[in-house]
Image (cartoon, grey):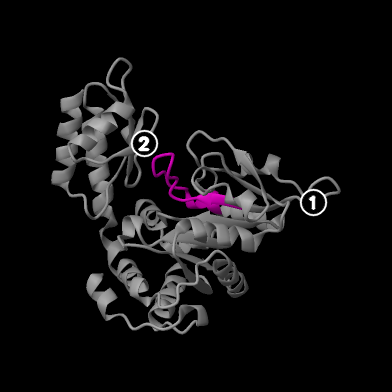
Amino acid sequence: MRRAMFEAEVGDDVQSEDPTVNRLEALAAEMTGKQAAVFVPTGTMGNQAAIKAHTNPGEEIICEERAHIILYEMGMPAAFSGCLVRAVPTADGRLTWADIAPRLRPASDHYRGTALIEVENTVNIAGGRVYAIETLQEIHAQAQAAGVKVHMDGARVFNAAVASGRSVAEIAATVDSMCFCLSKGLGAPVGSVVVGDQDFIAEVRLVRKALGGGMRQAGVIAAAGIVALEESPKRLHEDHENAQYLAQALRETDGVRLDPDAVETNIVFFTTEPGRIAGAELRQRLKAKGLLVSGAGDRIRMLTHQDVDRAGCEKVIAAIRAEL
């Protein structure tokens, strides 16, 4: 990636004159089966630009209550797009049409109505869970019949594709638009891509500019994204295998609560048994040993990626067992 960045040919991306960015966008559109794509600095910008392009102020968005666009994007559906979010609780972070249908509202003289359904695949806060393609197909078909768009926060959609045995294009076909990250599992240092039809992407470009996302000679970072798309998907199964290794070892660790069946991709959540060291304290002790894990409250969250090998997994397991 660094070699590709060093050698990247660049131009002015705001004027669509950066050949490396143009190549990245064309590759992303081809891989997802969409008409067009636009390179953005972050997944948050990509999601929020998509929301803005799909909606008008006062309209409603239906999503799961732990969606990234609610928990980690600074309230931007309301602050930037002026939309009302209708958050739906589910057991595992995945919506079904049965969850959505009772909350779908047409416009009336009392409210603007539902404009967008948002799904997340994989579901981050639920531990990297993957949507069944049939569930996504039903949501999309019913949404189309109701005149409602569907957007996917596909930050880790390549992980979802590997785990489900479906291509990214098959998954993307179940939504009107999608944002996916070039970082995270794909390993680029920065960047995300939004895909959709031509008119939608033209609007997203305008919103990107309004959000400060016109990056000029962005080919330097887009070059890493091209490598990420061409090379990284073929090795994502290794991350899933390492996550399963972590999950199984932790399940067998005295003092740990973890359901290994809930680990479908590269995210592992666990908690400690009552009376043991609290999760927040365990995170601090691991940090003191040079092992960085995240989480909230008593939940501990670990992710496997290309910089985590089996030896690293064994190291963190030994460190956790030593603290328990």
Main SS class of the magenta portion in the image: loop
Residue 309 x, y percent position in the rendering: 17, 49
Report whether 105 appears left or right of 162. Answer: right
Report which residue position mark 2 lands on: 295
Residue 164 x, y percent position in the rendering: 39, 52
Q: Is residue 111 magenta?
A: no
Report whether 46 appears left or right of 183. Answer: right
Q: Residue at x 26, y 77 (%)?
A: 6
**What kind of residue is marked 1?**
Ala
Q: Residues within 10 Å of mark 1 (few under 14, many from 20)?
A: few
Report which residue position mark 1 lands on: 107
Q: Work out which quarter of the rendered image holds the C terminus and state it.
A: top left
Where residue 255 sits, quadrant-wise, is top left
Kindly tell me whether residue 257 is visible in this rendering.
Answer: no
Residue 227 x, y percent position in the rendering: 30, 70
Where residue 293 sits, quadrant-wise, is top left
Where residue 147 sits, quadrant-wise, is bottom right
Q: Is residue 131 magenta?
A: yes
Above or below, 98 against 179 in this view is above
Mark 2 residue element: strand
Mark 1 residue element: loop
Q: Residues within 10 Å of mark 2 (few under 14, many from 20)?
A: some
Q: Residue at x 63, y 51 (%)?
A: 79
**What kind of residue is marked 2?**
Gly
Q: Which residues are magenta?
A: 117-136
Above or below, 195 against 239 in this view is below
Above or below, 94 against 214 in this view is above
Residues 33 and 72: in front is 72
